[in-house]
Amino acid sequence: MKVIAHIHTDFPTKFGIPRQSGIIASLQGRIVFEPEYRIAEAVRGLEDFSYIWILWEFSKTVRDTWSPTVRPPRLGGNIRKGVFATRSPFRPNPIGLSSVRLEKVDIDAKLGPVLYVSGADMMDGTPIYDIKPYIAYTDSHPDAASGFASIPAEYLLEVNISDTMLQSVHENQRESLIDVLAHDPRPQYQNDPERVYGMAFGDVEVKFKVDRGLLTVLQITTSETQ
C-alpha cells in the first residue's frame, strides 16, 4: 500500500475531531498529493462529483496487536462489541473510511492537483491511501439498519465564548470552532463539570469546561503566546 496524499486540517491532535465525517460541514480540509501522484490527469473528471470517499490510515493508533472486541464510546465505554461491528480505530489494519464534500479541485503550480474538501474527520497530516468518487445511487442506502448507531448521538451544547476571545481565532475558522465545541469534543464517557479540557484547533489552544449542557470557553491562547 502506498500513501498517495496527506490531508491538512485544523486538528493538530486527535482531541476534538468529529466522531464521523460530515457531522460538521463547516470544517475545511486540503488534500495534497505526494510528488509521484501530482499529475493533473489523475483527477480528471473528479470535479464532476459532489462527494468523494477517502481511504486513510489511523496513523496515531498503529499497533502490533489487536482485540476482537472493543468498547465504543457511543455506548459509554462499558459495553463490548465486535471490532468489525464498529468504526473503532483499533483494528487489525488501521484503515479509516470517510465521505467528504469536494469543494473544488485546484491545480497548483508546485503542488499539482489540490483537493479542497469539507466535513473531514481527520487529523492534520493524516496519510491517504486512495480517493474514489461518491456515487449516490449505489452508495446511499436511506433504509439501512445502523445497529447501535441508528439514532444520532450528537447533541448540541450551548457555547459561551466572549467576542474578545473569539477575535484570537482566524475569521474563517470561527464558525468551525464553535461547531466543534457545540458537538461536545469530550470523550462521551467523561462528564466532570469541574474538569478543564484543552483542545488544539488551528494555531490556537482552547480551554473550556462543560456543565449541564453549557460549554464555557475559559481561555484561547495563540501559538505565539503559548
Image (cartoon, rainbow, N blue to C red):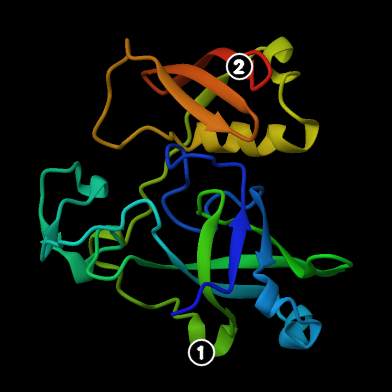
Q: Position of residue 157 (x, y in %)?
A: 47, 29
Q: Are marks 1 and 2 in contact (CB under 8 Å)?
A: no
User: The disc labelled 2 sits on which kind of residue?
Assistant: Ile
| Residue 138 numbered tag | 1
**x and y percent of residue 150 in the render?**
31, 62
Name the image quarter holding residue 38: bottom right
Image disc number at residue 220: 2
Dot 1: few (<14), some (14–19), or many (≥20) neighbours within 10 Å?
Answer: few
- Characterize the local packing of mark 2: few (<14), some (14-19) or many (20 or more) Cα atoms within 10 angstroms: many
Q: Is residue 182 above or below residue 49?
A: above
Which circle, 1 or 2, is nearer the viewer? Answer: 2
Residue 215, x across and y down, in percent: 47, 20
Amino acid type indicated by mark 1: Thr
**Split into 4 quadrants, where in the image is the C terminus?**
top right
Would residue 152 be found to the left or right of residue 52 on screen? Answer: left
**Quarter the N terminus occupies:** bottom left
